[in-house]
Structures are given as structure tokens and as C-alpha cells.
Image (cartoon, rainbow, N blue to C red):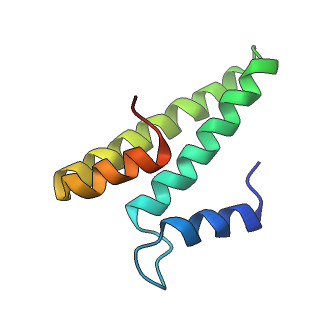
């Protein structure tokens, strides 16, 4: 899972201003980290359907946040996609 140090490192690298902890970029980066962790988890635990439901909720939340950023500023959206390596 995500430790406090890892989470603070993610916040530090994706924040927009010094006191930023909840901007969409930070939220998407944290959610992406959790999605990657759960994806690895499912390679060994194939029948963990309850966690899979949580994964689908996280994917939906990330999608909505990405759509919000895209509607506000396309350049911010594109840089975030490149940094997180979400699209190919």
C-alpha cells in the first residue's frame, strides 16, 4: 500500500504551489499510484473481486478528474498525461 513517505513524495512532485495538497494533478497522481499497486496485486490474487470493485471505482474517479482538467486547460492535461505515462 501507499506509505506516508511515498504519498508526501508524490504530493511534492505534482503540487502547483507550496501549500498544494488537493489539486486535481495531485489527486490523479495518488490515484494512479493506487491503481498500479492494485494491478500488481491482481496478478497474484485473481479472485479478489471486492478489491477489483474498488479498482473500478478508482479508475472512474481518475477518469472524471482527467476530464475536468481537460475542460479547464488542455496543456495541463497533456503534460500530466505525459508525466504519468497514461496514454501511449
Q: Which quadrant of the structure image shows residue 10?
A: bottom right
Q: Which quadrant of the structure image shows residue 76?
A: bottom left
Residue 75 x %, y % = 23, 55
Give above or below for 10 relative to 64. below
How many callouts does the rendering have?
A: 0
Residue 24 relative to residue 38: left or right = left
Q: Residue at x 37, y 39 (%)?
A: 63
Residue 60 x %, y % = 42, 36
In the picture as drawn, the residue positioned furthest to the right comes out as: 44
Q: Residue at x 75, y 14 (%)?
A: 47
Quadrant where the C terminus sits is top left
Give above or below for 1 relative to 46. below
In the picture as drawn, the residue positioned furthest to the bottom comes out as: 18
- In this orientation, which residue lies closer to the viewer: 61 or 12? 12
Give above or below for 79 relative to 5. above
Q: Residue at x 48, y 46 (%)?
A: 84
- In this orientation, which residue lies closer to the viewer: 83 or 33? 83
Residue 83 relative to residue 39: left or right = left
Q: Residue at x 63, y 44 (%)?
A: 34
Residue 79 x %, y % = 34, 53
- In this orientation, which residue lies closer to the viewer: 36 or 80? 80
Residue 8 x %, y % = 66, 70
Amino acid at each position: 500500500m501507499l506509505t506516508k513517505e511515498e504519498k508526501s513524495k508524490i504530493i511534492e512532485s505534482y503540487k502547483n504551489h507550496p501549500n498544494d495538497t488537493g489539486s486535481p494533478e495531485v489527486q490523479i497522481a495518488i490515484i494512479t499510484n493506487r491503481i498500479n499497486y492494485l494491478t500488481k496485486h491482481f496478478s497474484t490474487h485473481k479472485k479478489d473481486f471486492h478489491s477489483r470493485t474498488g479498482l473500478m471505482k478508482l479508475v472512474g474517479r481518475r477518469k472524471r478528474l482527467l476530464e475536468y482538467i481537460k475542460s479547464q486547460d488542455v496543456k495541463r492535461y497533456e503534460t500530466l498525461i505525459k508525466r504519468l505515462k497514461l496514454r501511449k
